[in-house]
Structure formats: C-alpha cells, structure tokens
Image: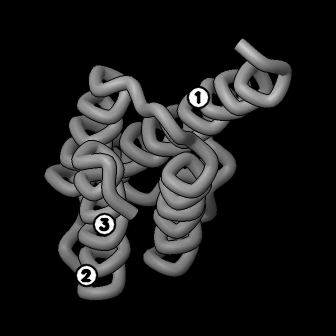
Amino acid sequence: MSLVEGQECRSARVDSFRVSKAARLLHEAFVKEARYGPVDKLGLASGPDSLLVALFEVERGVRSVIENVEERRRDEWDSLVEIVEAIASDARRSECVEHALRLAHELAVKALAGGR
C-alpha cells in the first residue's frame, strides 16, 4: 500500500466516523424531541431550522465520503443507510426536513451502489 492509499484509507475511516456520529446525534435529538418536546441538550437548538442544518451536515459528510473514497466497505455503507433510514422514521414530517432526509438517503444509497 502506498502512502497516498494509506492516507485515503485513514481519511475514509475519519469521514465515515464523522458521518455516523453526526447521524447518531441527530437521530437521538429526534427521538428525545418526539418524547419530551424540543431539546437543546445535544448542541442543537430546537426547531425545524436547526434540525435542517444538522441534516445538511450529515448530507455534507456523506458527500465527502463519496468524493474521497475509492474503495468502499459494504458493511459501513449498509450501516450508514440504516442510520439515515432510522432518522427518517423518527423525523417530524415537515417538508424541508423530509427533503433533506430524502437527499441524505439517496446519497447513501448511491454510495452503497458505488456510484457518484
């Protein structure tokens, strides 16, 4: 493995971890909000605008992984798709949030298929 390939692998792990962490935090925020009303415990202000910002952060992370990784591990992408689907199932159904979720899900599915 060349130095460049090693850096790409490390970068892929960092990006995957960052996306997964953002998605999990977002998922937890939706679950808590659904149970207890608006929350700000995870660094997310309550309300659809801040949730949308968090969703786009997840989307940006997914895009980063797609653009930077040559070889993808199928199990990592499967778990990313599962996380995004879990977010979608718990999200409140406003149009802007649904749009962002759909976009993030499409990106994850495209990455799983190996496309851009």
Q: Amino acid at mark 3?
A: Leu
Element at badge 3?
A: helix
Q: Nearer the viewer, residue 113 or 30?
A: 113
* Mark 1 burial class by Cα count in 10 Å: few <14, some 14-19, many 20+: some
Please indicate, yes or no, whether residue 72 appears anywhere in the rendered image.
Answer: yes
Pick whichever, 44 or 35, lies toward us.
44
Q: Which mark is residue 61?
A: none
Callout 1 touching callout 2 (CB < 8 Å):
no
Q: Are marks 2 and 3 in contact (CB under 8 Å)?
A: no
Identify the image quadrant of residue 101: bottom left
Q: Nearer the viewer, residue 103 or 24?
A: 103
Residue matched to label 2: 94
Q: Amino acid at mark 2?
A: Ser
The Cα–Cα distance between marks 3 and 1, rounded to whole angstroms, is: 19 Å
Q: How far, Cα to Cα, is label 1 from label 2?
A: 28 Å
Residue 109: percent from left, percent from top:
24, 53
Query: Which residue occupies 22% across, 42% down?
Result: 86
